[in-house]
Amino acid sequence: MNTELLFMNQKIPVSFISSDQKAIPQLINILERNSSHSSAAGTSDFNQIDRIEIIGNNAVLHKKHVNQCIELPLY
């Protein structure tokens, strides 16, 4: 399934293979929590997200312009 998530004033494509309807709200909570911690620390990796894949209980954040991923546990 594919959807878009509006985060930090940008639309981010999200793809997932799950019937768990709690995955998207949980992803939003984790992104907001981690982005507030990273902005307080002076880092801003979360404004460089190109797309997100939800695989099982993890979210894989693919960054723009860099072949790099960040994996976050959802639960």
Image (tube, rainbow, N blue to C red):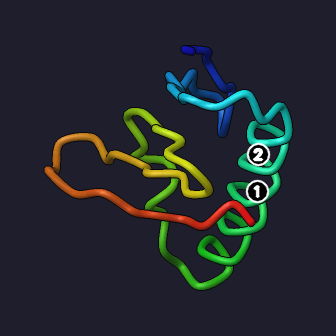
For badge 2, the amino acid type reads: Ile
**Looking at the image, which is closer to me, 15 or 63?**
15
Residue 31, image quadrant: bottom right
Amino acid tagged 1: Glu
Give the percent coordinates (x, y) of residue 26: 80, 50
Q: Position of residue 25 (x, y in %)?
A: 84, 41
Q: Secondary structure at mark 1?
A: helix
Image x and y of residue 71, in percent: 44, 63
Q: Quadrant of residue 9?
A: top right
Q: Which mark is residue 28?
A: 2
Q: Viewer-proximal residue, 30 or 7?
A: 30
Whole-Å distance between the Cαs marked 2 and 1?
Answer: 6 Å
> Foreground residue, 42 or 49?
49
Q: Give yes or no for contact between labels 2 and 1 (Cβ–Cβ under 8 Å).
A: yes
User: What residue lies at 43% left-to-right and 49% top-to-bottom?
Assistant: 61
Q: Quadrant of the N terminus?
A: top right
Q: Horizontally, is 62 left or right of 11 in the view?
A: left
Q: Quadrant of the C terminus?
A: bottom right
Residue displayed at 42% across by 43% down: 49
Picture quadrant where residue 68 is located: bottom left
**Up-down relation of residue 67 to residue 5 (above or below):** below
Q: Secondary structure at mark 2?
A: helix
Which mark is in front, 2 or 1?
2
Q: Is residue 35 above or below residue 37?
A: above
Residue, disc 1: 32
Q: What residue is shown at x 39% (from left), y 62% (from top)?
A: 70
Label 1 CA crowd tier, 10 Å (few <14, some 14–19, many 20+): some
Q: Position of residue 73 (x, y in %)?
A: 60, 67
Q: Residues within 10 Å of mark 2 (few under 14, many from 20)?
A: some
The answer to whether residue 15 is left or right of residue 68 is: right
Query: Most extreme residue toward the bottom, as rendered?
Result: 41
Quick check: 3 above or below 32? Answer: above
